[in-house]
């Protein structure tokens, strides 16, 4: 079924997969040659096609191929590309003013985004926010705030954690290649402890939560000292580490330990937040109320905006002028965020994310039964994944994962891989994608798996 309902990307962008050339087509190949000549090779690309338009559940390339989008620009365009309310509000703002610098003369949009964040994030305590440009910048500022508030220096992070690519956030990130390799030295006073990864827990998944929490806490107490620890920083559903859902019970235990010792508990919800998992924030799943929460990716419909939100007394610790940046909370990005939040509410995108899980998870589980290369199906809402292993073992099958992704790309399905062992295929469709496209994408995946 083909719908031409305007889910933006411009009027009448057909919601259909269509291949009119090989992938990549000649125009993309020409542009790729220019990219290779002009752009640093460190800036890679997952697919060798150049984008022309995107909206709803499709991305159209410069050769006229229409791909089904299971990536959302890495969990960013949850409301779709060029969503109506995002375009309307951001365009109106563009005609008013593009920048004054919030630290020079503030504007209402900045305040309104912070008011929304106070309402939407977990907990009914008094909250305040500060806005930044990127996820990494938000994480850096959460660390600054936690250190200032506690007067302590140590930051505890977890195996498989990902927090960004700036110097401090590289240190917080666990995976060497490609994020850290060759880019050291890294920032000091960062300590990494185990996370409850049920699929890979040596004694099996049953006691994973309590054993991992006990190990993590023992390491913090013995190796760092609870009294030296400013913050514990964790993604409630780990993204780049492989869409790992910490075993139930792990997060509440760690949050409780933090509370007992005056340690700031920071949830990095940059990938998992804003309706992605079928809730406003993944922390809600186990009733976690973080002291601070970092957000970015999905919050502004594709424009660069990030935030730290948290307990007013912690957020207010730093002296006036201690937090900021030239572009942080840019007025156009704030307008876009208000448009994205409006869209999330109006279309009930939490329900849409849960519906995506309802459609995709049973089909992925069925695929796992007939394809032993799939070791596990996991995730929540529209943040789902399959972990690929050598059949009959838990050895990561990185090669099969790369081959599967490539086969999907050739058929016009945009998928991304992830994971510490690069053996996880993740599914992050825009939450506004049509159900017919979801099914068609899964058909392509099934065909590619069968041929693998
Ligand atoms: C993407 C991501 C970041 C970094 O965000 P950028 O905007 O790329 O700097 C940090 N934490 C998590 C969990 C992420 O997924």
Image (cartoon, rainbow, N blue to C red):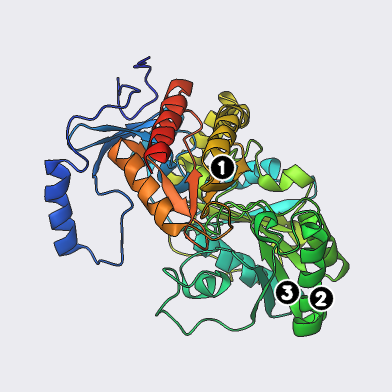
In the picture provided, is 122 more to the left or to the right than 269?
Answer: right
Q: How many marks?
A: 3
**Alpha carbon distance from label 3 to label 2:** 16 Å
Tag 2 residue: 218
Quadrant including the N terminus: top left
| C-beta proximity under 8 Å, tags 3 and 1 | no
Residue placed furthest toward the front:
392
Q: Residues within 10 Å of mark 3 (few under 14, many from 20)?
A: many
Quick one: SS at disc 3?
strand
Q: Residues within 10 Å of mark 1 (few under 14, many from 20)?
A: many
For the residue pair 165 and 442, the one nearer the viewer reads as 442
- The image shows residue 179, relative to residue 9, as above or below, that is below
Q: Residues within 10 Å of mark 2 (few under 14, many from 20)?
A: some
x and y percentages locating residue 47 in the rendered image: 30, 48
Residue sitting at 55 percent across and 59 percent down?
241
Of tags 3 and 1, which is closer to the observer?
Answer: 1
Which mark is drawn over residue 230?
3
Quick one: SS at disc 2?
helix
x and y percentages locating residue 38 in the rendered image: 17, 63
Tag 1 residue: 383
């Amino acid at each position: 079924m083909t719908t031409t309902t305007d889910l933006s990307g411009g009027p009448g962008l057909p919601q259909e997969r269509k291949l009119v050339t090989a992938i990549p087509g000649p125009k993309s190949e020409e542009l790729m040659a220019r990219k290779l000549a002009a752009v640093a090779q460190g800036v890679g690309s997952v697919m060798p096609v150049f984008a022309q338009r995107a909206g709803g559940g499709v991305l159209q390339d410069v050769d006229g191929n229409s791909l089904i989008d299971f990536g959302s620009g890495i969990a960013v365009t949850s409301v779709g590309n060029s969503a109506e309310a995002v375009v309307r509000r951001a365009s109106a703002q563009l005609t008013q003013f593009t920048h004054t610098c919030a630290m020079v003369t503030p504007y209402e949009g900045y305040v309104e985004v912070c008011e929304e964040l106070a309402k939407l994030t977990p907990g009914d305590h008094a909250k305040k926010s500060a806005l930044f440009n990127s996820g990494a910048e938000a994480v850096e500022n959460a660390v600054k705030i936690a250190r200032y508030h506690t007067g302590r220096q140590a930051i505890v992070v977890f195996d498989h954690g990902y927090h960004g690519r700036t110097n401090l956030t590289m240190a917080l990130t666990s995976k060497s290649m490609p994020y850290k390799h060759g880019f050291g030295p890294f920032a000091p006073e960062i300590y990494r402890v185990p996370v409850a990864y049920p699929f890979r827990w040596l004694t099996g998944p049953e006691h994973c939560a309590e054993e991992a929490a006990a190990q993590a806490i023992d390491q913090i107490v013995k190796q760092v000292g609870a009294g030296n620890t400013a913050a514990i920083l964790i993604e409630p559903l780990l993204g780049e580490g492989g869409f790992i859902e910490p075993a139930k019970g792990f997060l509440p235990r760690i949050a409780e330990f933090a509370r007992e010792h005056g340690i700031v508990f920071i949830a990095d919800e940059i990938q998992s937040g804003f309706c992605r998992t079928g809730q406003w924030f993944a922390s809600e799943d186990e009733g976690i109320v973080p002291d601070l929460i970092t957000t970015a990716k999905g919050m502004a419909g594709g424009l660069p905006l990030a935030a730290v939100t948290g307990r007013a007394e912690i957020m207010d610790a730093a002296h006036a002028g201690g937090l900021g940046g030239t572009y942080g909370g840019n007025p156009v990005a704030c307008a876009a965020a208000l448009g994205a939040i409006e869209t999330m509410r109006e279309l009930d995108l939490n329900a849409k994310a849960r519906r995506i899980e309802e459609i995709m998870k049973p089909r992925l589980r069925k695929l796992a039964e007939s394809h032993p290369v799939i070791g596990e199906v996991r995730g929540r809402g529209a943040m789902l994944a399959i972990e690929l292993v050598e059949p009959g073992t838990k050895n990561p099958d990185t090669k099969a994962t790369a081959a599967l992704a490539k086969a999907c790309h050739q058929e016009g399905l945009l998928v991304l891989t992830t994971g510490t062992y690069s053996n996880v295929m993740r599914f992050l469709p825009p939450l506004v994608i049509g159900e017919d496209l979801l099914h068609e994408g899964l058909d392509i995946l099934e065909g590619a798996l069968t041929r693998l």
